[in-house]
Image (cartoon, coloured by chain):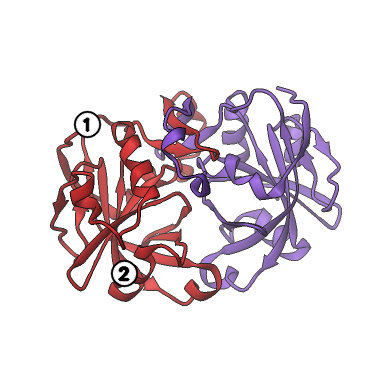
Chain colours: A red, B purple
Amino acid sequence: MIYRKKDFPVSKIRRFLEPGPIVLVSSAWKGERNIMTMGWHMVMGFEPSLIGCYIWDENHSFDMIRKSKECVINIPTKDLAATVVSIGNSSGRDIDKFAEFRLTAERAAAVGAPLIHECYANFECKLVDSSLINKYNLFVLEVVKAHAATSPRFPKTIHYRGDGVFMISGENTSRFRAKFKPENL
Amino acid sequence: MIYRKKDFPVSKIRRFLEPGPIVLVSSAWKGERNIMTMGWHMVMGFEPSLIGCYIWDENHSFDMIRKSKECVINIPTKDLAATVVSIGNSSGRDIDKFAEFRLTAERAAAVGAPLIHECYANFECKLVDSSLINKYNLFVLEVVKAHAATSPRFPKTIHYRGDGVFMISGENTSRFRAKFKPENL
């Protein structure tokens, strides 16, 4: 699917990451580009907008992100589920995943890594703390620029349940909204 | 809802956390007990079974978990959504949340913190690394014992989209399972 996107406040991107979707991480280093599928990430702040990501050191992207100190976190939707699996099953050592899976690499505004045009949202990230990579494979990223589709309001995101099962995001409800304290929204 | 649970392998609890549900964290310290609502967490390994959790230092649970070095991560389902909001809106400084919200504190096997009986699953955790608390509010926990309901197979978990909107977990599909490499399941 091709989404129409606009700039999105980096302090609010947790709206898309907090529900726990599988994401695609794109990177570039020395003329090479790559994409990996990632399920282990968490919001760690919103001003600045920090994200913690666990990346296996056996992934080809591991060194590309560590060395370039940049990447893009892309949010794929249900229509890309088969591609998400194929990306996770293959290695950038062997193929150019953009070409192989017919994804469009789009120039980012603030980083050298490309955006994946077909995704619902794209978060341009800088690696701001590499001190936890050796011990925990944990990359602390700051989102410096965000792009998000305006429609649909709630994307059908892909969530991994293990053992080859995906959960597709379901019903969205604001019927508990009145119960929230304003500062907890 | 009351679930029938059995022991569950700690190395597989990522199945319940990776899709990104809101969780309830229960703790105990010096005769006091508490519950907090938590949305920022990530899987950081499965052998040992590690979870990273971001906890605000203004939460009453922050010190209880830091000092007792233990807690329980409980997975609530859709029927508890209103309670999850109320727990997030109140402080353990003022009330006993188990009593206030009529939740049953159940004795854990390996930690002093209580399980929440009404939740779908309960993961007993030890704080194994407190060195990132000061800088990132990041608690690195190891799941040492897990309990999970046997039915339904896929719980209707609660996911937070920000701005008072919850997403309830949707369709589960294994139709892409054949595409997975065995080692990626």
Label ID, residue A151:
1
| Viewer-nearest residue: A9 or B110 | B110
Which quadrant of the structure image shows residue B133?
Answer: bottom right
Quadrant in which the N terminus of chain A appears: top left
Rate crowding at label 2 as few (under 14), some (14 to 19) or many (20 or more) other CA atoms within 10 Å. Answer: many
**Res B153 visible:** yes
SS at mark 1? loop
Residue marked by disc 2? A64
Q: Quadrant of residue A171?
A: top left
Residue A160's place in the image compared with B71, above or below, is above
Question: Dot 1, crowdedness within 10 Å: few (<14), some or many (≥20)?
Answer: few
Q: Position of residue B125 (x, y in %)?
A: 72, 54
Looking at the picture, tell me which residue is in the foreground, B48 or B29: B48
Residue drawn at x 71%, y 27% as measured from the top left: B150
Q: Position of residue B54 (x, y in %)?
A: 55, 57
Q: Residue at x 51, y 75 (%)?
A: A134
